[in-house]
Image (cartoon, rainbow, N blue to C red):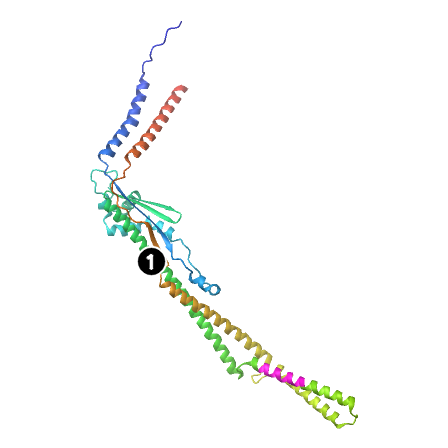
Amino acid sequence: MRPVAGLARPKARHLAIALSFVLLVVAPVAVSGWYLYARAADQFASFVGFSVRSESGPTGSELLGGLGSLIGATSSSGSDTDILYKFIQSRDLVERVNKRMDLRAIWSKPEGDPVFSFRGNDSLESLLAEWERKVRVYYDNGMIDLRVLSFDPTDSRQIAQAILDEGTLLINQLNDVAREDSLRYARTELDDALARLKQARQAVSEFRNRHQLVDPSADVQGQVGVVTSLNQQLAEELVSLGMLQANAQANDPRIEQTQLRINVIRDQIDAERRKFGSDSESGEVLSDIVGQYESLSIDRQFAEQTYTAALAAYDTARAEANRQSRYLAAYVKPTLAQEAEYPERAKLLLILGGFLMLLWVIGVLIYYSLRDRR
C-alpha cells in the first residue's frame, strides 16, 4: 500500500497569484468602496417626460379638399420630436440653461468629491461634457424622458423645469416659423391668382372692344336661329309648291309666286351661311373670332376657379395662424426627489468587482497557458 501524499506546500507562483488578486481586485474594490461611501456626495434625480402634440381636428388642407391640391398646398409632418431630442443635447440649450442658473456652481458644490462633481474649466465644451454626464435623455416612440442629476433636489428640479421651458419655447418658435411660411405661401398664391384673373378679364375686355362684340357666341346663336327659321319657311313653301303642282293647272300664277318665294328664301339662307365664313369689320373670319373668344372665356373661368381656391386657402391659413397647432405636453412634471438615489454605490462596486475579477482570471489563464508551453 502506497503512502498518502502530504499537503503541497505553496510555491512562489501561488503567492504571486494571490498577491496579484489582492492588488488587482481586492484593493481597487476596497478603495472604490471607501470613496463611494465616504467621499462621494449624494446626488438627487429629477425626472420629466414630455412629447410634442398636435391639435386634433381637420386641417386646412382637409377642409379645402381638392382645392388645396389645385394650388399645391402642403402640410408639415411631425419631426418636431426629433428636433427637440437633438436640441436637448445641443450647445445652444446648455448655454440657455446656464444663463438662467449657474450650472458650474450647481455641479461643483461638493468640494471633497472630485470624481462626481464638476472640476472642468470655464469653457463651454467642458460644461457640455458635464451636461452629458448629468442629463440623460431617453427617446422612444415619440416620447422623451429625462433624468437630471445634481447634489441638491431643488437644483435638479429647476434644471429639469428649465429644459422643459426651453423646449416649449423651441416648439413655439417652430410653430411661428411654420405659420409664417404657410401664410406667406398662401398670400403669394392669392396674389398670383388675382393677377392671372385680372389679366384674363382684361384680355376679354380688350377682345370685346377690338371686335365691337359683347358675346360672339350669342351673335352666332342669333344667326343660327335666323337660318333655322328660314329653313322652316323653305320647308313650308316647298310643301305648298308640291300641293299646287299636284292640284292646280300648270299656268296657275300661284305656282310662279311660290317658286319665287322659295328662290328668295334660298338666297337668304345662302347669304346667312356665308356670314359664318366671311370677314368681320376687323378683317377676321367670324368662326375664328368665336374660337378666340371661347379660348379667352376658358382662361377666365380657370383663373376665377384658381382665385377662389387661393382665397379659401389663404383664409384657412389665417385661421390656422391664430391657433397653436403644436405644443409640448408634459406627461411627467419635473419631480422633486425625497432621497438620494445616486450614485448607485452597490451597483458600481459590483460592476467594478466583476470587471476586475474577469481581467484577473484572464491574466491567470494566460500565465498558466504560457508556463505549460515551456
The boundaries of the magenta stretch are: 219-232
Q: Nearer the viewer, residue 4 or 54?
A: 54
Residue 228 part of the magenta segment: yes
Residue 162: x and y in percent read: 27, 51
The residue wearing badge 1 is 173
Q: Is residue 203 visible?
A: yes
Q: Please state if 255 lies on the left or on the right of 158 as rendered.
A: right
Quarter containing the N terminus: top left
Quarter containing the C terminus: top left
Q: Is residue 278 visible?
A: no
Residue 72: x and y in percent read: 46, 63
Query: What's the amino acid at mark 1?
Result: Gln
Q: How many discs mark residues in the rendered view? A: 1
Q: Is residue 199 above or below residue 58?
A: below
Q: Quadrant of residue 189?
A: bottom left
Residue 343 part of the magenta segment: no
The residue lying at 70 percent from left, 85 percent from top is 235
Say what secondary structure mark 1 lies in. Answer: helix
The residue lying at 33 percent from left, 57 percent from top is 172
Q: Is residue 6 above or below residue 177?
A: above
Extreme residue toward the front, this view: 247
